[in-house]
Image (tube, rainbow, N blue to C red):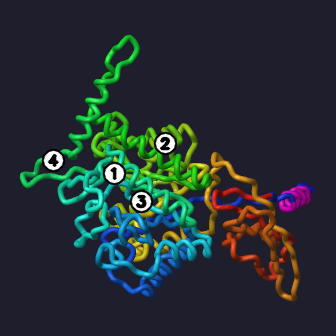
Amino acid sequence: MKIVLLMIMFAVVAIAQPMPRINREFRAFWVATVDNIDFPTSKGLSAEKQKAELIAILDLAQKLRMNAVVFQVRPMTDAVYRSKLEPWSEFLTGQMGKAQDFDPLEFLVAESHRRGILVHAWFNPYRAYHPAAKTMSAEHVSKRRPSIVRQYGRYMWLDPTDEGAKQHSLGVIKDVVRRYDIDGVHFDDYFYPYAEKDAAGRGIDFPDDENYEAYLKRTSAVTGPGNATRSPLSRDDWRRQNVDQFIETVGREIKRIKPEMVYGISPFGIWQPMPELGITGFNAYKELYADARKWLRDGTVDYLAPQLYWETARKGQSFPLLLDWWREQNVKKRFVWPGIAAYRIGSTETFNAGEIAAQIGKTRTSDDPGAIFFSQKSLRNDLGGIQRELTERIYTTDAVIPHFSWIASAPMRAPEVKLEREGKYVRASWRERGERRAFWYVVRAKDKDGWSQSVLPAGEHTITLSASRQIEKIVVTAVDRLGNESR
């Protein structure tokens, strides 16, 4: 009798098995163009070879079940796309300013979207010249507007405290947001530069003296209540304030153009050393004047991707310890998707593909997991067998991104679905309804073994399944690029 009751209970549970929630996880890698790190692999490639390399990048993303790429479009106040504001990049053509007919960003966006892969355009907001470059164009900002550019060691830098520099970079970013169907705007960890040294090995201070002196004069002329003179900010706080203002302005202005534009920043992984918490190392708050904790706590960004490029066992910079700290700062409940150091696989005995798997496992202790790998080349070169680790252990099924619930958008309408049985197959086909465009379709199928799901790009409108699976039900939902799912 007990056996019969157990069988009945099992049958009821099986029948009542709920439809599963869709798999959600942000999965991306950086594609660096500076110094030809990831794309193009060398300067002066033909348009056809550039296209082939971009297709290979996207093929790898599909193979590894990624759903986004972070593509560097502005490595040093130049352009890896067609621009009237800044010259073509030397890393593309071999000579800064030398034009080419092929637009890599336009091509990448179209091909990525066709595959159901998002594109976040990665800008370096301040770096004006990198020593890996060998040429200079008359159209470069250092020639056209030298007053906003500073020579700093081996580099040139836009002065973060100069209003003209801020407006120049903002204009470049807004131009890309207007003209390209990108899904996000992204900055990395370069705000004020990492310290350069002189010939004697001494640190060089960034040359913003003139602007600071002008600020002090303006401040001393301003009085508050009771004619009391307002105290000026220290130089460090003044620098941070200028960076904060720029970061906030970019977020506000890109969303004014496209309210659904996603805004992400990937700062250095340590905000400030906190030895009492077991966190030591470089101080990005003090040295780069980057108050990334503020941007996260204020909700200025939609996601923060701190570069947690250390292994779990690393004393002072343990990956899980740092990830937990950043999550604790996330009072506005934005997304924290850490940068993962794929390039460091094999650098130590403990930093291997298994360490990467453990780090991804740690990210999944959040309701809205995600990570970005640096960089595409490391995955392409399959360091330490990372491709097999990703496909067989980590990303075994497709996923859409977590839902940006705080970004206002119209609801998605459910697609209209038609089911047909044809001999050995069951086919579902659907069409979009409403004006709001899908980016993915999620197909859930219930068969004799339970529920399964597939994620398809929006360009696909059919799926064919074997009738031998004894299909009972097929449910199709539409998901937009912000992760909104239809009924």
How packed is label 1: few (under 14 Cα within 10 Å), some, or many (20 or more)? few
What secondary structure is found at the residue carrying circle 3?
A: strand
What secondary structure is found at the residue carrying circle 2?
A: helix
x then y, percent, for residue 253: 52, 49
Q: Say which mark, if any, is on residue 203.
A: 4
Residue 105 visible to an observer of this rendering: yes
Going by the numbered disc 4, the residue's amino acid type is Gly
In front of the other: 386 or 283: 283
Residue at 30%, 24% in the rendered image: 221
Give how far apart the Cα atoms at labels 3 and 2 are.
Answer: 19 Å
Which residue was labeled with disc 2? 296
Residue at 36%, 41% in the rendered image: 242
Q: Say which mark, if any, is on residue 314.
A: 1
Going by the numbered disc 3, the residue's amino acid type is Phe
Going by the numbered disc 1, the residue's amino acid type is Arg
How packed is label 2: few (under 14 Cα within 10 Å), some, or many (20 or more)? many
x then y, percent, for residue 173: 46, 58
In front of the other: 274 or 142: 142
Give how far apart the Cα atoms at labels 1 and 2 are.
Answer: 25 Å
Q: Say which mark, if any, is on residue 417.
A: none
Give how far apart the Cα atoms at labels 2 and 4 are.
Answer: 30 Å
How packed is label 4: few (under 14 Cα within 10 Å), some, or many (20 or more)? few
Which residue was labeled with disc 3? 123
Left or right of residue 154: residue 484: right
Mark 3 vs mark 1: which is more N-terminal? Answer: 3
Give how far apart the Cα atoms at labels 1 and 4 are.
Answer: 27 Å
Mark 2 vs mark 4: which is more N-terminal? Answer: 4
Left or right of residue 200: residue 389: right
Q: Is residue 88 above or below residue 285?
A: below
Q: Is residue 11 magenta?
A: yes
